[in-house]
């Protein structure tokens, strides 16, 4: 998989892929991650990527020109399955979206900044808008990192055990059951007896019951109705 991230704050991204799962994916040649500084694509003598909005109003707006020039250059070299803009009003990221995107070969992710991007970018250059929540951050770099992590960890060979990813919460629209490890007793806090029986059938039944309970609690807490 190849992922190209477009940003005017590249330093916020580079530290992200130097560690953990993303670094593992790169080292195992499962991921080619490229970060593009949009300032490099500006024709302005000061390399500006933003300007004041037409019609007035506070804040600055990312210009279409550097974004378009960067995307056009990338598309000359590769075919892209998706060009994604990280936006608070995009479709809310969930496990199903991550599963879907993990099957793609080439993805561009555009990080917004300032007041946002020129609307013509959203109308003509991107194919999809994704949000990690209904709140505003100072830029799209952190949401982009969240999206990349949620996608890349699903690639075969990235995690030590692919079943670990398949058992995550939301993979089957269920919340994962509680998990425990050694010691069996810590400060009078005890591991449930059922997990110590060795009876796989009963353990699996208990885990499923706990998953159902947690899922119902999650739905009630978040006012989600089937």
Image (tube, rainbow, N blue to C red):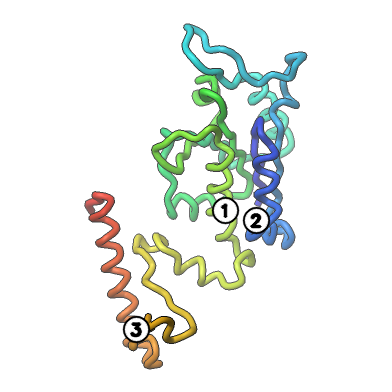
Q: Position of residue 190 (x, y in %)?
A: 37, 83
Circle 1 SS class: helix
**Disc 3 versus disc 2: nearer the observer:** 3
Q: Nearer the viewer, residue 127 or 226?
A: 226
Name the image quarter holding residue 156. Answer: bottom right
Q: Which residue shows up at 71% across the image and 56% down it?
A: 26
- Mark 2 and 1 residues: CB-CB less than 8 Å, in contact? yes
Q: Earlier in the sequence, mark 3 or mark 2?
A: 2
Q: Residues within 10 Å of mark 2 (few under 14, many from 20)?
A: many
- The answer to whether 83 appears left or right of 73 in the picture is left
Percent x, y of residue 92: 41, 43
Neighbor class of circle 3 (other Cα within 10 Å; few <14, some 14-19, many 20+) is few
Q: Position of residue 97 (x, y in %)?
A: 46, 49
The mark that comes first in sequence, 3 or 1, is 1
Mark 1 highlights which residue?
149
Q: Residue visible at 49% across and 52% down?
A: 98
- The residue under the point 38% across, 67% down is 176
**Residue at (45%, 40%) from the top-left corner?**
131
**Residue 220 visible somewhere in the drawing:** yes
Secondary structure under tag 3 reads loop
Q: CA distance from mark 2 to mark 1?
A: 7 Å
User: Could you tell me residue 203's position as x and y percent?
Assistant: 35, 84
Quadrant housing residue 177: bottom left
Q: Is residue 135 above or below residue 186?
A: above
The quadrant holding residue 121 is top right
The residue tagged 3 is 192
Question: How would you rate the neighbour count of disc 1 (Cα within 10 Å): few for under 14, some for 14-19, many for 20 or more?
Answer: some
Mark 2 lies on residue? 22
């Amino acid at each position: 998989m190849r992922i190209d991230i477009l940003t005017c704050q590249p330093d916020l991204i580079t530290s992200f892929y130097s560690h953990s799962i993303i670094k593992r994916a790169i080292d195992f040649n499962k991921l080619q991650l490229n970060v593009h500084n949009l300032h490099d694509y500006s024709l302005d003598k000061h390399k500006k990527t933003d300007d004041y909005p037409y019609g007035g109003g506070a804040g600055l707006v990312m210009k279409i020109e550097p974004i378009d020039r960067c995307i056009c250059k990338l598309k000359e070299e590769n075919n892209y399955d998706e060009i994604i803009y990280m936006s608070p009003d995009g479709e809310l990221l969930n496990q199903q979206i991550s599963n879907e995107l993990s099957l793609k070969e080439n993805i561009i992710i555009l990080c917004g900044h300032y007041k946002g991007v020129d609307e013509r970018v959203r109308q003509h250059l991107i194919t999809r808008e994704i949000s990690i929540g209904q709140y505003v951050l100072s830029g799209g770099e952190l949401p982009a990192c969240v999206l990349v992590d949620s996608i890349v960890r699903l690639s075969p060979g990235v995690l030590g055990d692919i079943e670990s990813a398949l058992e995550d919460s939301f993979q089957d629209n269920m919340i994962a059951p509680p998990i425990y490890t050694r010691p069996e007793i810590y400060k009078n806090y005890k591991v449930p007896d059922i997990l110590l029986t060795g009876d796989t059938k009963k353990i699996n039944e208990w885990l499923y019951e706990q998953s159902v309970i947690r899922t119902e609690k999650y739905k009630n807490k978040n006012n989600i109705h089937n």
